[in-house]
Image: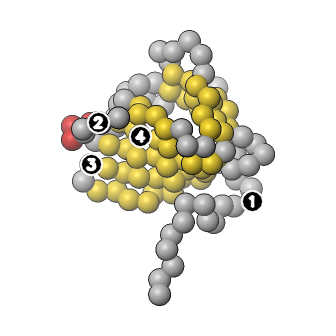
Amino acid sequence: MAATPNLFAHIPGELPAELVELLYAGGGVRCERIVSFGHRSPDGFWYDQPTTELVFLLRGAARLRFADEPSDRELTAGDYLLIAAHRRHRVEWTDAKEPTIWLAVHIDGRRETAVL
């Protein structure tokens, strides 16, 4: 019997950089598992992605900053956000005591239908 993949398995004890693993790509969708351990965006860096991103925080905690909002957004396990294509954002903080595990689904905006 083949082993079933698990989003909480195989987390390295030390991560010099965020771990980004491609889980699926096809049909205008890309799905990634991202593991952060005290990581944040470099000073002055903003994500400006060509795709819409539906991001789920599965474990840990983080703070995101959006260029068009006055304050950070606090995220804890179970929180999710729909980030429109080209909406500038950055990771201000992730928990350094435990891994922060994200599931990021990037959607080609020309094919999207949002029901959130």
At mark 1, the secondary structure is loop
**Is the C-beta separation of discs 2 and 4 under 8 Å?**
no
Asked if 35 appears above or below 79 in the picture, the reply is below
Q: Amino acid at mark 1?
A: Gly
Sequence-wise first label, 1 or 4:
1
Q: CA distance from mark 2 to mark 4?
A: 10 Å
Graded by Cα atoms within 10 Å as few (under 14), some (14 to 19) or many (20 or more), the crowding at tag 4 reads some
For the residue pair 38 and 48, the one nearer the viewer reads as 38
* Colouring mode (rainbow / by chain / secondary structure / one colour): secondary structure
Residue 14 in view, yes or no: yes
Which residue carries the number 1 mark?
13
Q: Quadrant of residue 116?
A: top left
Q: Nearer the viewer, mark 2 or mark 4?
A: 2
Q: Nearer the viewer, mark 2 or mark 3?
A: 2
At mark 2, the secondary structure is loop
Graded by Cα atoms within 10 Å as few (under 14), some (14 to 19) or many (20 or more), the crowding at tag 2 reads few
**Is the C-beta separation of discs 3 and 1 under 8 Å?**
no
Sequence-wise first label, 2 or 3:
3
Q: Is residue 16 left or right of residue 44?
A: right
